[in-house]
Image: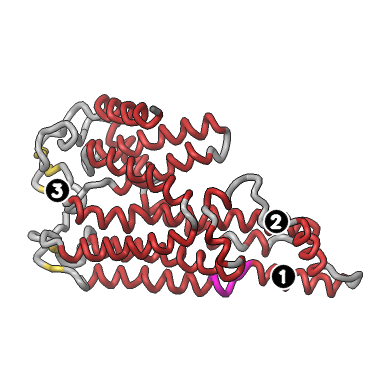
Amino acid sequence: MMKSKLFFLLVVSITLIGYANAQNCTNVNGDMFFNKCWKNNDSVLPLMASFIMQFVNPRTVAYTTTSMIVLLPAIFLLNNSPSIYPTLKNKYIQMKYVLIHMLHRASYPLVLGVGLYAVFRQRRPCFCDGSSIGSYYGMPSGDAMAGGILAAYLIDKAPFYPVISRISGVLLMICVCFERTILGFHTVGQVITGTSIGFFLHFYSTRVPQWVLLVDIVAQWILSAVALQVDPHLIYGPNDPNNLWVWFIWGLSFQIIVIFALIRIGVLEGWGALKKSYNHSSRQDFNIQSEAEDHLLLYTIKPSSDESESDVRYKRRIAKDADIPYTFITFVAFFIVNFISFCMQNWNWLVHTGSSENGTHM
């Protein structure tokens, strides 16, 4: 019932704000309501849409989450109170779970979403003033998928005041769908499909055992790689910014971080930890360590009355739990794959090439 109301609200909102089609625009996918171009050049609407776009899109979400993972060990490095360290470690592990899984979900539009472009093969809707808007394909909308994932998190987890959190989730979905249609990047059908997929992916990925996510990632790689390589319509010009293969490899680099993090959880906390779902591990009342382990941890960091010895042990424990060397290795792998994607764009590796007029550069 709740989903049907959200769907209805979404359609009505897009209809009201996207009433006028832009002049000099052709509907690439036909004149049907769900497929037509709703690009709007009137007054403040495109300005509002451009403002929204800079905050809620797959790249922004992925980069923000990645930055938070990098900065997370600072919680340990800046702390100087052994008495609260067991509680601090618990919070650190919980936050690590949240960020790892948020990055996994944020990567769906970047990898799976790009692969689905080549599965659905539905063009973007607007051909305006002699050129198309966006890349070659637009079904499903990756930005709407990211909006659906974030909205589902706000509605499901309600991380702050529950009512405000859930209202924010609904408004977030509407704003992203508004932005994509008004700017002419997607149709109503494409944003609704993207939002629905994102909603489903949140509930799926938070309820399955964590080891399933490793299989999930590999399946995404296979699907996307095959679909993008066999599509005969994907022909790219030199240094094409809309090269979907490059988008796929770039998104894949974020999933490298997720793989390294999940493996580390299995090694440090036991592979039984990966049998639990994120939904179970991120509960507010979930305590990673038992009280006995808390006392043992306090003993190992402050074993005697010798303050200098205690300080040395405490700093050694912080360095161990912050796991800086492994984090460094993880991000070296991330940057290598990320850099390879730029090389692929510059030199058109593993793609069909053509002139800029015949490619997908738009």
Q: Position of residue 254 (x, y in %)?
A: 41, 62
Q: Which residue is mark 2?
A: 88
Badge 2 amino acid: Leu
Question: Which quarter of the figure is the N terminus placed in?
Answer: top left
Select label 2 or label 3 by which is in front. 2
Residue placed at 36% from the left, 54% from the top? 108
In what element is the residue under mark 1?
helix
Select label 3 or label 1 by which is in front. 1
Asked which quadrant contains residue 333, the reply is bottom left
Q: Main secondary structure of the magenta part?
A: helix
The residue carrying pointer 3 sits among few (fewer than 14), some (14 to 19) or many (20 or more) residues within 10 Å by Cα, namely many
Q: Position of residue 182 (x, y in %)?
A: 25, 36
Q: Which residue is mark 1?
A: 317
Badge 3 amino acid: Ser
Where does the magenta region start and end? 322-327
Q: Which mark is residue 334?
A: none
Vertical side of 145 occupied by 110: above or below? below
Q: Is residue 75 visible?
A: yes
Q: Is residue 81 visible?
A: no
Question: Which quarter of the figure is the C terminus placed in?
Answer: bottom left
Q: Position of residue 72 (x, y in %)?
A: 59, 59
Whether the residues at callouts 3 and 1 have beta carbons within 8 Å, the answer is no
In what element is the residue under mark 3?
strand
User: Which is more N-terminal, label 3 or label 2?
Assistant: 2
Asked which quadrant contains residue 322, the reply is bottom right
Instruction: Name the foreground residue: 204 vs 29.
Output: 204
Q: Which residue is mark 3?
A: 132
Q: Is residue 112 magenta?
A: no
Q: How many marks?
A: 3
Q: Is residue 326 magenta?
A: yes
